[in-house]
Amino acid sequence: MSRLDSMINRLVAQRSILDHAAALIAGVPGPVLELGLGNGRTFDHLREKLPDREIFVFERKITASPRSIPDSDHVILGEIRDTLPFCGPRVGAAAALIHADLSNGDPTDDLSRRSWLSPMVADRAAPGAVVVSGHALDLPGFDELPLPEGIRPGRYYLYRKQ
Ligand code: SAM
């Protein structure tokens, strides 16, 4: 498979899992946490799918198109390891959806991030919240949910807090 094919598959899978997650949280109150703004594609998709939700974006360096950057009240700038545990006063309620798109494809980085990020995500998630991640997380007290049809196992991970 060419890198172009792989990228297309990844983006189709990402849209499908985010649409699925948006439907799953219909009855769960709380904001959305977008971990990693990047160029803002998934943020823009989530705000279109979830127009009534507050979406807080966590990013170390804003490089997105100005059209895909939330207002400053909804941008939490810095290293997620430093900001996520202390975002309560800004974000308020526990999150209904947490989307972590932080992987750079390096398995060592993914393992390292998995160890520090998992407990932070677990802490910020409301009961019934859904977590979508580009790499596996260790989330005791969450169920790993089946992926929507067409997404190959290992491409994304989907969890729901009990
Ligand atoms: N979902 C985005 C989109 O659709 O455009 C792409 C996100 S991109 C793969 C990952 C982003 O996460 C990068 O912009 C990077 O700067 C940010 N990031 C990665 N690790 C981070 C960390 N530890 N703290 C803050 N930002 C981080």
Image (cartoon, rainbow, N blue to C red):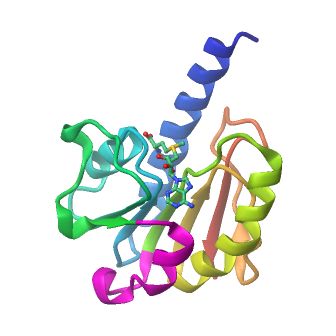
Number of marks in the rendered image: 0
Residue visible at 44% across and 86% down?
Answer: 86
Whether residue 139 is situated above or below residue 133 in the rendered picture: below
Seen in the image, is 157 located left or right of residue 53? right
- Residue 69's x, y, as percent? 24, 48
Q: Position of residue 111 (x, y in %)?
A: 80, 59
Question: Would residue 114 appear left or right of 123 to someone viewing this image?
Answer: right
- 85 on left or right of 39: right
Q: Quadrant of the C terminus?
A: bottom right
Q: Nearer the viewer, residue 106 or 160?
A: 106
Q: Can residue 80 be seen?
A: yes
Q: Is residue 143 above or below residue 68?
A: below
| Dominant secondary structure of the residues highlighted in magenta in the image | helix
Q: Which residues fall within the magenta stretch?
A: 78-95
Q: Residue at x 77, y 63 (%)?
A: 112
22 or 93, nearer to the observer? 93
Q: Say whether residue 126 is visible.
A: no
In the orientation shown, which residue stands out farthest toward the top? 2
In the rendered image, which quarter contains the N terminus?
top right
Is residue 110 positioned above or below 38 on the image? below
Q: Residue at x 53, y 30 (%)?
A: 11
**In the rendered structure, does residue 92 fall within the stretch colored magenta?**
yes
Find residue 59 and report its image quarter.
Answer: bottom left
Camera-side residue: 84 or 10?
84
Residue 40 horizontal/vertical position (percent)? 35, 42
Query: Splitting the image into 4 quarters, where does residue 142 fall?
Result: bottom right
User: In the rendered view, does 29 fall on the left or right side of 162?
Assistant: left
Residue in view at x 35 percent, y 86 percent: 93
18 within the magenta span: no
